Image (cartoon, helix red, strand yellow):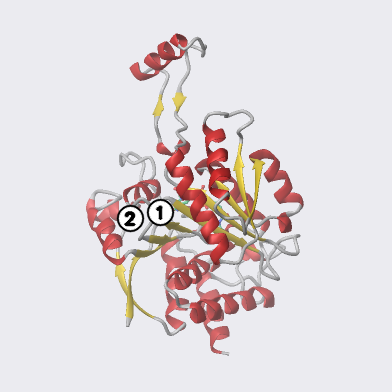
Amino acid sequence: MAYSVTFIPGDGIGPEVTDAARKVLEATGVKFDWDLAFAGDQAQDRYGTPLPDYLLNSIRKNQIALKGPVTTPIGSGFRSVNVAIRKALDLYVCLRPCKLYLGAPSPYKAVDVVIVRENSEDLYMGIEYAQWTIQASRLIRFIEDCGDKVRPDSSFSIKAISTSASQRIAKYAFEYARANKRKKVCAIHKANILKATDGLFMSTCSEVAKSYPDINFETHIVDSICSQLVRHPEKHDVLVLPNLYGDIVSELCAGIIGGLGLAPGANIGDKIAVFEPTHGSAPNYAGKNKVNPMAMMLCGVLMLRHLGEKDAADTLEDAIAKVIAQGKFVTYDMKADRDDPTAVGTAEVAEAVIKKMKE
Ligand code: NAD
C-alpha cells in the first residue's frame, strides 16, 4: 500500500530540501503516492493566488502533507500563507522536537526538548488596528471609558487567549508526554504581567495537569525559561506555550541543537498533519545546493512515526544521526568554519543518508 501525501515543494530553498527529504523517505522502502501541490510564490505565479483551493482540498483529502517553507508574496492579501494554511485546516498544534545529535555544532552535551506551541490564537490572529483607523480611535474611547489611558497615537494588536484553545493544547502536550514516555510538562507564560491572558493560559494548563498525575507539571515565566534553556537545556522536557512565545522559544532551541538546519516540525489538528521545518525559505540560498536538508528529512521522520512506520522512522533517523556524527557529508552550517571547503551540498547529504541506510 502507498500512502497518499500532499507534497508542497515551497519557495526559495524549499524545492531542494523537499527533494532531498522525498528521496530519503523513498529509500526507506515505504511507498508514497505524492500529490504535488503549490503554495506561496510558486502558486502565485501559476494560479494568481498563493493559497489555491486545490492545495487545501488536497491536504483535506490526504490528511497528511510534507511541506517546504513558503514565502508570502507581498501584496497578495495574506499576512502569512503559512498561518492561513494552519487556520484553514485548524492545525492547532505546532510540534517542534529539538534533539541534539552527537556531532552537531553545539556546545551542549544532551538536549531533548519538545516544544508544543499553540497555533491558533494569541497575537498571530492578526487582529491589528493601525493608529489612523476608526477602530483604533474607538478602542481608545473604549479604554478611556474603562478608566484606563493609552496615548492617543497608539496602534493595537489584540492578544486573544481562550480557555478552550488553552485546554486542547495542554491536553495535547500531556498526551504527547504520556505516549512518548516523557516525565515533565512545563507551561510557559508571562502571567505576572499579562494576568488576564497568560494567567488564563497558565491556570488552564494547571487544571488540565490534574488529569495527568503520572506526569510532573511546572510553570515558568517566558524570560526565565530562555535563560534556563541556554544554561541547562538538558533539564527541560516538554514545553507548552502560547503562540508567540512558542515561535521565539522554538528558534532559541533550534540554536541550542545546532541551528535551523536541524530543527523539524509539524502542524497538527484532530485529523490532519502537515510536516514542515522551523526554518523559512532562505531566498538568498535558493538554487545553490548549499543548505542543510536535515530539518526537512527529520520532518520525514516525524511523518513516518505519525503514519505508524516506526521501523522506517528509526532507520532514517539513525542514518541521519550517523551522517552528523561522521561529519564528512554535511553542509556548511554544520562546520565550525562556515567557509570550510569540505562542506558538501544539499543533494550530497541526501546521497550520504541513503548510503548509510543501506549499510
Ligand atoms: P529563514 O529561516 O528562511 O532564514 C534565516 C537564515 O537561517 C538563513 O539566511 C540561513 O542562514 C539560515 N537557514 C535557514 N534554513 C537553513 C537550512 N536549511 N540550512 C542552513 N541554514 C539555514 O528566515 P527568514 O530569512 O526570516 O525568512 C525567509 C522567508 O521564509 C520569509 O519570506 C518568511 O516569511 C518565510 N518563512 C516561511 C516559513 C514557513 O514556510 N513555515 C517559516 C519561517 C519563515
Where residue 19 sits in the image (x, y, percent)? Answer: 42, 71
Q: Disc 1, ligand 1: is the CB inside 8 Å? A: yes
Kind of residue at badge 1: Val
Quadrant for the C terminus in the image: bottom right
Instruction: Please name whichever residue, 2 or 345, is drawn nearer the observer in this view of the structure.
Output: 2
Q: What is the total number of numbered labels drawn onto the structure image?
A: 2
Kind of residue at badge 2: Ala
Instruction: Please name whichever residue, 69 or 108, is drawn nearer the observer in this view of the structure.
Output: 108
Local crowd size for mark 1, using a 10 Å CA cut-off: few (<14), some (14–19), many (≥20): many
Residue annotated with mark 1: 70
Does label 2 or label 1 sit earlier along the sequence?
2
Quadrant for the N terminus in the image: bottom left
Residue annotated with mark 2: 39
Residue 282 visible in the shown view: no
Question: Height in image: 355 above or below 188?
Answer: below
Where residue 261 sits in the image (x, y, percent)? Answer: 57, 61
